[in-house]
Amino acid sequence: MVGGNLPPGFRFHPTDEELIMYYLKNQATSRPCPVSIIPEVDIYKFDPWELPEKTEFGENEWYFFTPRDRKYPNGVRPNRAAVSGYWKATGTDKSIYSGSKYVGVKKALVFYQGKPPKGIKSDWIMHEYRLIESRSQVPTKQNGSMRLDDWVLCRIYKKKNLGKLSMDIKVEDQSQETLVANELVTSHDDEQQQQTFKFPRPCSLSHLWEMDYMGSIPQIFGENSIFDQQNMFMLNNNNNNNGNVNTPRQLGDQMGNQYSEAMVRFQGNQPVYVNPVFEFQ
């Protein structure tokens, strides 16, 4: 009906003034509109989620020409009831001007599911545009007619639930942060485990003698140790008197043997100090 007659890239984003002056006014006076993309639909005979399929144009918002009926035979209040709910006005009406001339009114409404006054508010919004002189052209009551306005123009869309969207993003961010934190903890534990297994556990003093980072034997055994510097000096002296020149490995083995004998002979409560990083087995 409409899509094939529209130029490529066409977008319908009219202002409030343009909707009143070039579309609704032309529809009310039976003149053609600039583009025939707004269908004539009695929107109050449908629920709002059924209306998008009643038009061939529109993605996030939809436009309709619709009549309005009276709620009461002798009144001027419009009937806002729909199939499974009703439209309720919200906020204040907005006056539409063309230059300095007052030409129409814009009213905002929200759709409620159920019956008033206990309806459940939905995300469906309607902007209703009405000509300022439209009611004066329609007889108050003619042959029992309930018609209030021949035509009004309605823009209908569904409001995005930003609160829910932000909540989902926040939950997703928290999940990502928790995942990253767990990975960091796991990585830290792995590093500590690798550092723990990095150092060997020597089983003899000869091994300690070959390790550069352990320092000298006198540094390992402090002043309060059983095997102190004096014992090591005596051991070296005895070997020299016997004419034997010991290599560092042989000297370490002899020291280990004497250390073991000293541990057997040691009695009392004197503590034995060792390097805090290593313990002997």
Image (spheres, grey):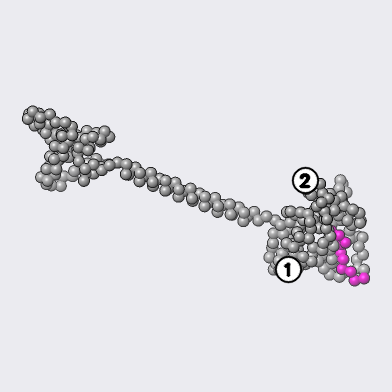
Residue 233: horizontal and vertical position, in percent? 13, 32
- Which of the labelled discs sits on residue 54, or is there none? none
Give the labeled residue for mark 2.
9
Q: Residue at x 79, y 49 (%)?
A: 12
* Amino acid under disc 2: Gly
Q: Is residue 23 left or right of residue 123?
A: right
Q: Is residue 151 magenta?
A: yes
Q: Residues within 10 Å of mark 2 (few under 14, many from 20)?
A: few
Q: Is residue 230 visible?
A: no
Q: Is residue 242 left or right of residue 82?
A: left
Q: Are marks 2 and 1 in contact (CB under 8 Å)?
A: no
* Amino acid under disc 1: Ser
Q: Which residues, given as a range, are shown in magenta?
A: 143-153
**Tally of numbered discs:** 2
Residue 118: horizontal and vertical position, in percent? 69, 68
Give the labeled residue for mark 1.
84
Q: Residue at x 58, y 54 (%)?
A: 168
Q: Quadrant of the N terminus?
A: bottom right
Q: Is residue 262 magenta?
A: no
Q: Is residue 191 left or right of residue 168?
A: left
- Quadrant location of residue 208? top left
- Quadrant location of residue 192? top left
